[in-house]
Image (cartoon, rainbow, N blue to C red):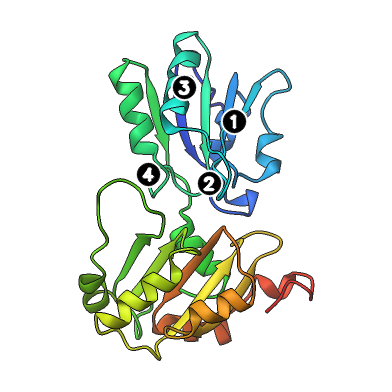
Amino acid sequence: MRLRAEPGTVYLVGAGPGDPGLITAKGLALIRSCDVLVYDRLVAPELIDEAPPGAERIYVGKEPGTPQAEQSDINVLLVARALGGAAVVRLKGGDPFVFGRGGEEAGALAAHDVPFEVVPGVSAAIAVPAYAGIPVTHRDTAASFTVVTGARSGSKEVDWSSIARSSDTIVLMMGVRALRAATTALIAAGRDPLQPAAVIERGAGPDQRTIVSDLAGIADVAEAAGVEPPATAIVGDVVSLRADLSWWEERLPLEVRR
């Protein structure tokens, strides 16, 4: 692929979750030809190393419980580097437009007449369950799935009652701290407390760990196991398919598997 990052342009690139092999060919070509690489906490180190030796590398990761880079500051940074003539790759874990604030960054760039492109990435919402052997849909089990954020952001509230009634599979992203509140709300809205549930820690990475229980007990089991971010929670009958479809963790060291 001969694609090169153009000066004065910002590329909002999804890196996919965990496994660096999930980057798209277009995303990798842009990383290899950029002047500035602005990257998040969950981006695989191997992808950062793909930037040219002379490229400026800027870390803007948001880590739970620590001072974070303000989104407004990141927006200003992207605009300034592009207006200065640099080819900028803004590299995000997963997909830029799935709880990645890519829309906010694109809006800031558009407001300053900065050319930009969006390079979609493999979303953690589907890839992380897949790496745990859990398909979010299955012809005989689930005809729909809903992706919800567990991180409190903005004014939009999650309608747990509607989700509990209408969606076969529920994927809760960034959900470690919100897990107990989410499961309580789903049960209160009528979801079966005995429905299978799972929490996948560090999904699609070399130290992925999967915890399985039922909806009523998953928060307690995850807490007892010491699950920490990043983690993705799955609620639905598809979780039971993991018993036969698990594949990634079988390749990992024994001390990682659960």
Q: Amino acid at mark 4?
A: Phe
Numbered disc in front, either 3 or 1: 3
Cβ–Cβ under 8 Å for marks 4 and 2: no
Give SS at disc 2: loop
Please rate how many residues cluster around mark 3, counting C-alpha atoms within 10 Å: few if below 14, some from 14 to 19, many from 20: many
Residue 71 appears at what percent x and percent y? Answer: 43, 33
Query: Can residue 110 be seen from the camera position used here?
Result: yes
| Nearer-N-terminus badge (3/1) | 1
| Nearer-N-terminus badge (2/1) | 1
Residue drawn at (40%, 67%) of the image: 171
Q: Which residue is mark 3?
A: 78
Q: CA distance from mark 3 to mark 2?
A: 17 Å
The reply, left or right, for residue 133 in relation to residue 236 is right
Cβ–Cβ under 8 Å for marks 4 and 1: no
Residue drawn at (39%, 80%) of the image: 236
Q: Which residue is mark 2?
A: 93
Looking at the image, which is closer to me, 214 or 24?
Answer: 214
Q: Amino acid at mark 2?
A: Gly
Q: CA distance from mark 4 to mark 2?
A: 11 Å
Looking at the image, which is closer to me, 190 or 250?
Answer: 190
Circle number at residue 97: 4
Give SS at disc 3: helix
